């Protein structure tokens, strides 16, 4: 009998959104409408799609969604001016700068300009530092989604060996910190790691965040490993080779329908959290 668990992100996402509905109603009863502003610079089609998806998700729940679309010629200073205006707007609870921005913009400087209390996407170094130390308000949304999936399915972390493949500042590094804070033993791997398959074979939990389609193979896994695939590549494939990894894993996220839907739900949750903090 096949007793594998498909870690269903749609199911987790629905659960999070259902829990948000009464909180949003309570905010509105107090005269506060949770509000998220997304800044899109330029004309990257996949970025535009992501922004639209986030906007639709907000509207379905009753969160106010506003999109600011700046031309691709926008300078760093112009973008900083826009962010600063939003920081000072008390009706705005969350600010999301869609990544990537055009090459002439200093993206890190723009991220750092977002006020900590409105950094619902967890992109500032201050927010990252607080997350690593265990008291951050808003961890990056994809790492937060991964932890929520783990909790929803009651996957044990304490004492387990987690191998994270990828070290980006909004995915690999923060998810490593979150897992470490939950008493997992964490190995963070990257493009310079030697003997990657051997390291992955030691893992009880594998987080794939490398940005390469079907990079991690099933024969790299330990029998019964839990696989969380945070990759999303052209052709609707993740960073793990699903068919071969499914054979070895005890639990695995599909792509699409795994980490992605939960990531958007975490953005909604953080926006509601931020709105609630303005009442307190």
Image (cartoon, rainbow, N blue to C red):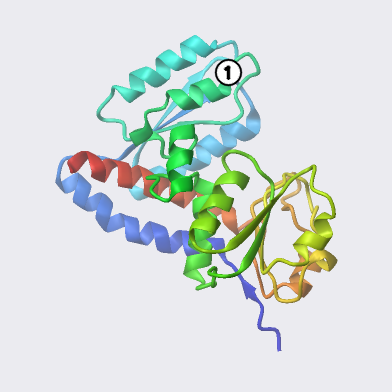
| Residue 69 coordinates in the image, percent (x, y) | 49, 21
**Rendered residue at 32%/35% (across/down):** 93
Q: Is residue 49 above or below residue 245?
A: above
Instruction: Report which residue position mark 1 lands on.
Output: 106
| Residue 74 coordinates in the image, percent (x, y) | 55, 12
For the view shown, which residue lies furthest in the left direction? 30
The reply to whether residue 202 is in sight is: yes
The reply to whether residue 55 is in sight is: no
| Residue 183 coordinates in the image, percent (x, y) | 52, 64
**Rendered residue at 48%/10% (across/down):** 77
Q: Is residue 43 above or below residue 148?
A: above
| Residue 223 coordinates in the image, percent (x, y) | 76, 76
Q: Could you tell me how many numbered marks the image carries?
A: 1
Q: Is residue 163 left or right of residue 131?
A: right
SS at badge 1: loop
Locate the N terminus by quadrant: bottom right
Out of 67 and 107, give the one closest to the viewer.
Answer: 107
> Tag 1: Cα neighbours inside 10 Å, few (<14), some, or many (≥20)?
some
Out of 10 and 185, give the one closest to the viewer.
Answer: 185
For the view shown, which residue lies furthest in the bottom direction? 1
Q: Is residue 108 left or right of residue 187?
A: left
Q: Quadrant of residue 106?
A: top right
Q: Is residue 169 left or right of residue 114?
A: right
**Rendered residue at 48%/63% (across/down):** 12
Out of 47 and 139, give the one closest to the viewer.
Answer: 139
Locate the C terminus by quadrant: top left
**Rendered residue at 54%/72% (across/down):** 155
Out of 128 and 10, give the one closest to the viewer.
Answer: 128
């Amino acid at each position: 009998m096949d007793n594998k668990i498909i870690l269903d992100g749609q199911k987790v996402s629905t659960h999070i959104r259902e829990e948000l509905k009464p909180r949003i109603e309570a905010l509105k009863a107090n005269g506060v409408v949770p509000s998220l502003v997304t800044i899109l610079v330029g004309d990257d089609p996949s970025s535009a799609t992501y922004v639209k998806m986030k906007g639709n998700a907000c509207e379905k729940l009753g969160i106010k969604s506003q999109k600011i679309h700046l031309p691709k010629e926008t300078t760093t200073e112009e973008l900083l001016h826009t962010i600063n205006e939003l920081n000072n707007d008390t009706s705005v609870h969350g600010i999301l700068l869609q990544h990537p921005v055009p090459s002439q913009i200093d993206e890190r400087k723009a991220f750092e300009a977002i006020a900590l209390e409105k950094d619902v996407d967890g992109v500032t170094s201050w927010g990252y530092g607080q997350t690593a130390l265990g008291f951050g308000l808003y961890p990056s949304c994809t790492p937060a989604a991964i932890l929520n999936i783990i909790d929803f399915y009651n996957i044990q972390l304490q004492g387990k060996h987690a191998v994270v493949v990828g070290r980006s500042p909004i995915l690999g590094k923060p998810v490593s910190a979150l897992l470490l804070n939950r008493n997992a033993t964490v190995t963070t791997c990257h493009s310079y790691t030697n003997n990657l398959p051997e390291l992955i074979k030691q893992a009880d939990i594998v987080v794939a965040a490398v940005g390469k389609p079907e990079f991690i193979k099933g024969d790299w896994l330990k029998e019964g490993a839990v696989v969380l695939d945070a990759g999303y590549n052209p052709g609707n494939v993740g960073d793990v080779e699903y068919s071969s990894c499914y054979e070895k894993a005890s639990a695995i996220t599909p792509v699409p329908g795994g980490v992605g839907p939960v990531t958007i739900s975490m953005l909604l949750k953080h926006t509601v959290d931020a709105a609630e903090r303005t009442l307190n």
